[in-house]
Amino acid sequence: MTATAPTALAELEAFAAGASTPDPYPIYARLRAESPVVWSAPLQAWLVTGWAEVTRAFKDAATFGPLSSGAGSSAIYGRTILHMSGDEHRRKAAIVARRIRNRRELRGTLRERISALVSALGDELPAAPGVADIRAGLTTPLPLTVIAELTTMHEAVNFPQWYHDLAGASVSNVSRDPAVHARGVAAREEIDAWLDPAIARKRADPGDDLLSDLCTVEYEGQRLSDTEIKSNTAFFLAAGIETTDRALVNLLGGLVRHPEQWERLRAAPDLVPSAVAEVLRWKAPVQGSVRQALVDASLGGASIAAGEKLILLLGAANRDPAVFPDPDTFDVGRFADNADPQFTPVGPLRAFGGGEHTCSGSLLAKLEMELAMEHLLDRYRRLSFAGEPPVDAGFMLRSAPDLHLLLHP
């Protein structure tokens, strides 16, 4: 008797539960073709794979909103700008935008600091042919140091561990692993304890940093509460790192597997912004975003009840052939003429969400990735894997766990 092949839904549910899946994109494609919005009983959520449906779930703020609690939510941080909507979200997100979306800052102070940090980290990489753990040496410490300095959390000895524990207990913990959640709670408690005196200092003597902005800005005539400042600072610590770190790992891994694309970038370094946008599409580092229905709704032919959870699979939406021709091909020149819009609400790329909840840090991540890539392209003729090629892992956050490369100056 021949065994029945598992359905795309069953395969995706197994993947979410921790099954090893070297390449989830064929599963996404089958599910998107069969049913772009489908209910998963194990996940207690609607899985959304079509670009149009994902985009509507982000942009239709009257129908769909942030998930504030439960497995796969970002509740570990407390209430942040991620959980706000309407005028409150716009005005409080603007606090962050003044610091990390300000074009003058991105061209000036932030660019100078990130460039100096890339150079310092790059100086530790091999100057002659040699092996480097590129994730430990560059892709993680770069955004981690930048966001820690912006929030002045670099003054706390334990901030790298806080980041790892918080990120693990957030949206990627879709199964609500109690041990992972407990580590996240402990990290939050340590962050809160560290922030208590820091907030008092910043209120009395603000500096030129994001934490000072949060401590001194007013909304409707009142300053943000200490609780709100703590929640948002904890959220920024984790959210400001994941995309840059994992996207650079995915991009470098893709360039090693497709050396003709590396040569193309070396010949035309002006394609770096396009290459960064392309890897966010081709191998989205943040594969999913969780929302909920605010009212009874219809989406992609499915009837969704108010309060039900939706997992928007960004990795699937970004390979929807209705929007991106030849979506499984890695092409560093795909966005040669329109790279910048992909990091704003107007571009079709769904790596940073959509609508009013487009990630505030997208331009900062773009700058970090571009400067890192420019440094590597200028310094190395060729990259190759040191040992067996790494295997991508993760359901909601996805990249190779580490990346050891042989670098050839």
Image (cartoon, rainbow, N blue to C red):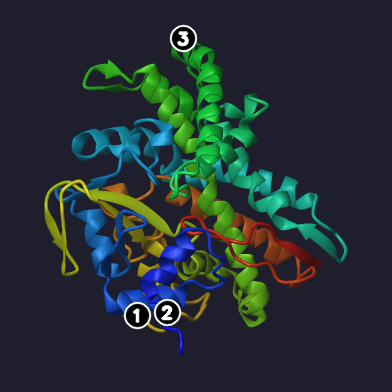
Whether 333 is drawn above or below 344: the answer is below
Instruction: Read off the residue under disc 2.
Output: 327
Asked whether residue 327 is in view, the answer is: yes
Label whose residue precedes the other's in the sequence (3 or 2): 3
**The one of 398 and 14 positioned closer to us in this rendering:** 14
Q: Residue at x 36, y 70 (%)?
A: 9
Marks 3/2 in contact by CB < 8 Å: the verdict is: no
Q: Residue at x 33, y 21 (%)?
A: 224
Q: Amino acid at mark 3?
A: Ala
Q: Amino acid at mark 1?
A: Pro
Instruction: Read off the residue under disc 1.
Output: 321
Marks 1/2 in contact by CB < 8 Å: the verdict is: yes
Q: Amino acid at mark 2?
A: Pro
Label whose residue precedes the other's in the sequence (3 or 1): 3
Instruction: Read off the residue under disc 3.
Output: 204
Q: Residue at x 64, y 52 (%)?
A: 139
